């Protein structure tokens, strides 16, 4: 796997060092091309079946890879209401409601139920014709059992006894994706001593289960075939709502009273002096814009998210203000090299030209837009089950083997945040 990096190479060395601790997930194959790919002169296809695999492989269920850090992982979900603003998508519904999940270090051996990847209602909608499994990833509606996948996080367990001053990472998923759609990365960070807060952007996310069994479905499928002006307006609304959600979550984390209601010890272990943010696609755009707008964020990562809009604004530019003005704190742009990667070029180049501090741009050869999500972990099994095609899988995750994609993404994100949120601790 080729890695193209802008900078002095220190981040790559740190990522390689971090990957050394990820050997159980296939680090060696993440740092060099697969042997059969070298021999054939072509990249390995993630959906390629092993010659010795039996027909029983079709019965393999999608599974998330285990986190590799020293801690077990705990999780808790909370419902937040922003009383300062109406919902931007459906103001008639009243105040803005946001669901968040916290993933955090826990002690091993703690008895508690393991959280599902998605609750039953969300899983059913995610796999429907109007869910992100279909419109973002090409899985045939109703063909996958999304309820069968489990996380490695135990619900409501106390924070690890040895945990002190834990840095915080906020996570924002891609446009239309739910907050659960990068649990592979989120659990890895939690297992390595971070408190990760995943944010569901209601009516943007594919579906959000709210208290009382209310399922808030995404409004985005309604934009299919809409005029460019409508799409532009919706994207601008989505980014603003996402940034406002992020700042509201930061406000909530700052409430000592709210933190007291978290699982035992967690509220006291959170270190709000060291907060970063990461996201994929529109979530990466959100991370950059939030870092630009809010000084409480100290570092950020954008995984393959362009930072511009279809139409020019009042300045005559399609670029967002963060792309025009940059940021003055550490930021990593982690990109794919497949079709569509050029969409990032203009906004990323402007962002880097106007930013100061430790700015990095890294491209994973063979990666596609969905590489930086749970897609590499979960979708290959669905190909074997006949729930999606190999072509759709390649369009989603490219030519990297699943373990390569997981290991590389985890290694770069961990290395970057270790450098900027843990340095000197």
Image (tube, rainbow, N blue to C red):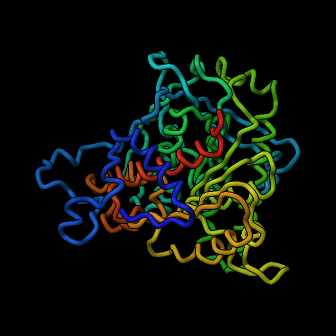
Vertical comparison of 348 with 109: above or below:
below
Q: Quadrant of the N terminus?
A: bottom left
Say whether residue 214 is visible.
Answer: no
Residue drawn at x 82%, y 45% as measured from the top left: 95
Residue occupying image coordinates x 75% and y 64%:
237
**Residue 352 occupies which quadrant of the picture?**
bottom right
Q: Position of residue 98 (x, y in %)?
A: 71, 43
Question: In the orientation shown, which residue stands out farthest toward the bottom?
Answer: 316
Q: Quadrant of the C terminus?
A: top right
Up-down relation of residue 131 to residue 121 (above or below): below
Q: How many labels does the image show?
A: 0
Rendered location of residue 297, percent (x, y): 74, 47
Horizontal arrangement in the rendering, residue 204 relative to residue 334 (left or right): right
Q: Which of 364 and 353 is in front in this view?
A: 353
Residue at 57% x, 64% y is: 7
x, y percent for residue 251: 81, 39
In the picture provided, is 193 more to the left or to the right than 203? Answer: left
Query: In front: 327, or 400?
Result: 327
As drawn, 55 above or below 264: below
Q: Is residue 110 left or right of residue 232?
A: left
For the point 64% across and 61% down, the residue is 359
> Which of the 4 image quarters holds residue 137?
bottom left
Q: Would you say residue 92 is visible in this rendering? A: yes
Most distant residue in the right direction: 84
């Amino acid at each position: 796997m080729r890695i193209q990096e802008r900078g002095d190479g220190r981040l790559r060395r740190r990522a390689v060092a971090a990957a050394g601790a990820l050997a159980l997930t296939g680090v060696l194959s993440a740092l060099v091309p697969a042997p059969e790919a070298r021999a054939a002169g072509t990249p390995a296809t993630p959906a390629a079946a092993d010659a010795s695999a039996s027909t029983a492989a079709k019965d393999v269920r999608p599974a998330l890879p285990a986190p590799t850090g020293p801690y077990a992982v705990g999780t808790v979900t909370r419902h937040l209401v922003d009383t300062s603003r109406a919902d931007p998508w459906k103001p008639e519904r009243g105040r803005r409601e946001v669901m968040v999940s916290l993933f955090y270090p826990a002690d091993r051996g703690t008895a508690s139920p393991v959280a599902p990847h998605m609750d039953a209602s969300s899983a059913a909608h995610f796999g429907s014709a109007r869910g992100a499994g279909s419109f973002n990833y090409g899985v045939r509606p109703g063909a996958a059992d999304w309820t069968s996948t489990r996380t490695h996080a135990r619900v409501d367990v106390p924070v690890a006894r040895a945990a002190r001053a834990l840095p915080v990472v906020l996570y924002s998923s891609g446009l239309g994706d739910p907050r659960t759609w990068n649990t592979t990365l989120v659990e890895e960070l939690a297992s390595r001593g971070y408190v990760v807060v995943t944010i569901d952007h209601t009516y943007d996310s594919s579906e959000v289960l709210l208290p009382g069994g209310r399922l808030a479905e995404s409004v985005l499928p309604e934009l299919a075939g809409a005029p460019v002006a409508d799409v532009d307006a919706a994207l601008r609304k989505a980014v603003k709502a996402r940034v406002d959600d992020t700042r509201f979550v930061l406000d909530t984390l700052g409430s000592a009273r709210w933190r007291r209601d978290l699982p035992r010890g967690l509220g006291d272990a959170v270190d709000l002096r060291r907060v970063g943010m990461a996201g994929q696609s529109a979530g990466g755009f959100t991370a950059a814009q939030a870092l630009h707008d809010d000084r409480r964020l100290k570092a950020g990562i954008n995984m393959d998210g362009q930072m511009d809009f279809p139409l020019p604004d009042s300045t005559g530019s399609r670029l967002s203000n963060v792309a025009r003005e940059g940021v003055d704190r550490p930021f990593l742009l982690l990109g794919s090299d497949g079709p569509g990667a050029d969409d990032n070029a203009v906004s990323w180049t402007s962002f880097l030209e106007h930013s100061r501090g430790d700015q990095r741009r890294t491209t994973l050869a063979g990666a596609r837009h969905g590489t930086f999500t749970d897609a590499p972990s979960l979708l290959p099994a669905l190909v074997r089950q006949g729930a999606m095609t190999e072509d759709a899988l390649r369009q989603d995750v490219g030519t990297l083997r699943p373990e390569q994609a997981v290991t590389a993404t985890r290694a770069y994100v961990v290395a970057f945040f270790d450098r900027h949120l843990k340095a000197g601790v």
